[in-house]
Image (tube, helix red, strand yellow):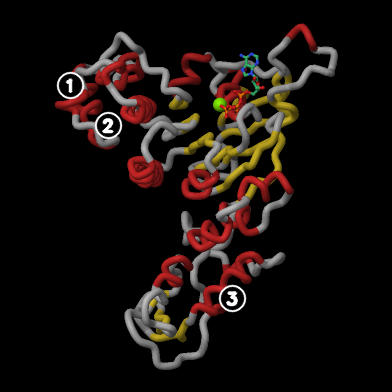
Amino acid sequence: MTDEPAISFEHVRKVYDARSKDGRAASAVDDLTLEVRQHEVLVLVGPSGCGKSTTLRMANRLVEPTSGRIRLEGEDVTRVDPVKLRRRMGYVIQNVGLFPHRTVAQNVATVPGLLGWDRRRTASRVDELLDLVGLAPERYARRYPHELSGGERQRVGVARALATDPPVLLMDEPFGAVDPVGRQRLQAEFARIQRALGTTVILVTHDIDEAVRMADRVAVLSTGARIEQLAAPLDVVARPASPAVAELVGRGRTARLLALGRLELADVDPVVEGSGTPVVLGTELGEVLHSFVGANQTVQVVDQRGAVVGSATPATVVRALDRVTADHPDETQVTDVHDTAVGTVRS
Ligand SMILES: Nc1ncnc2c1ncn2[C@@H]1O[C@H](COP(=O)(O)OP(=O)(O)OP(=O)(O)O)[C@@H](O)[C@H]1O
Ligand SMILES: [Mg+2]
């Protein structure tokens, strides 16, 4: 991981209405300073109209900032030809934005076409990508966008953005129209692809669950793209930095913590007789809790190699929840699931 950010926003401001630059006009983006690290998935989450799409669109110059600077790998984006810029950044558009008079295959082949790839290479890449997003090429390649469901159209949008493995991917509510089950599958599949390719991703959503599931870091925004909190998912859920974040995390916070928190050695009790299947250190707290549903009140805890390190009861899980929500958590106890080599939260 290099130190130079993939993308940096420096005091970026966007006022759409040029007639009201008297200072009283509400800016869509007020004064955004934000660095996107190489290879990370940074999720922007916040209420409708808070400036998420505007922020993305300024990165690839579909919208020009009123003031401030945006750099792509150190280079001021206003100095880069917009067409070349967009080839370096895949873009999945909110509400899809497929070309209506082009087939699915032709849509996916848009950027390869611009780059002058030959037919065979393009055709095999299109098939590969359609398979990847779960649309069998033989069924879907020749259809037109109006012959697809909303969720299928979104998947074509994702495939199109990935066509040339761009180093940076901007995704505006990419999974919004997919049903909940398909959505989780697509999220998991996308996460796998992203890790394999090392793509730097800015993903926009207003779904906090999608945010914490997909992100290395979450930026919670309020009106004017004001950053309420920028932190690892577990930190955002465990320690909301402002009332706006607390409201967003809101109900269901405990369930989210159970999904994000993991069992640590510090949580477990001394070894006593346990029954049933042992749980492994690092297991999601929700899964640990689930092992008590039914008969077991005590289970043994083992490390990755299977050696017994202690035991756990339902109270262990409550203690672990106390730990993850503590004001000053010991950094080393919080495992970053996306980068276990680092082992601490990168925030
Ligand atoms: N082309 C435009 N002209 C004028 N105002 C605009 C334009 N596009 C967006 N806005 C305004 O800028 C603000 C931010 O819009 P933006 O699309 O960035 O919000 P968003 O966070 O993406 O919202 P959503 O979650 O609903 O997609 C809103 O108040 C919106 O009305
Ligand atoms: Mg938007």
User: Looking at the image, which is closer to me, 176 or 138?
Assistant: 176
Q: CA distance from mark 3 to mark 2?
A: 45 Å
Give the mark nearer the N terminus: 1 vs 3. 1
Residue type at the position of mark 3: Arg
Residue type at the position of mark 2: Leu
Residue 319: assigned label? 3
Give the mark nearer the N terminus: 2 vs 1. 1
Graded by Cα atoms within 10 Å as few (under 14), some (14 to 19) or many (20 or more), the crowding at tag 2 reads many
Closest to the camera, between mark 1 and mark 3, is 3
Tag 2 residue: 129
Q: Is residue 30 visible?
A: yes
Query: Do the residues under discs 1 and 3 have CB atoms within 8 angstroms?
Result: no
Q: Element under label 3?
A: helix
Where residue 305 sits, quadrant-wise, is bottom left
* Residue depicted at x 42% and y 35%: 175
Q: CA distance from mark 1 to mark 3?
A: 58 Å
User: Looking at the image, which is closer to me, 153 or 247?
Assistant: 247
* Residue depicted at x 73% and y 48%: 243
Q: Is residue 231 left or right of residue 172?
A: right
Where residue 122 sits, quadrant-wise, is top left
Closest to the camera, between mark 2 and mark 1, is 2
* Residue depicted at x 61% and y 27%: 55
Graded by Cα atoms within 10 Å as few (under 14), some (14 to 19) or many (20 or more), the crowding at tag 3 reads some
Residue type at the position of mark 1: Arg
Most distant residue in the front direction: 294
Q: Element under label 2?
A: helix
Tag 1 residue: 120
Where's residue 277, x and y in %?
Answer: 32, 79
Graded by Cα atoms within 10 Å as few (under 14), some (14 to 19) or many (20 or more), the crowding at tag 1 reads few
Query: Regarding ligand 1, which quadrant of the image does it lie in?
Result: top right
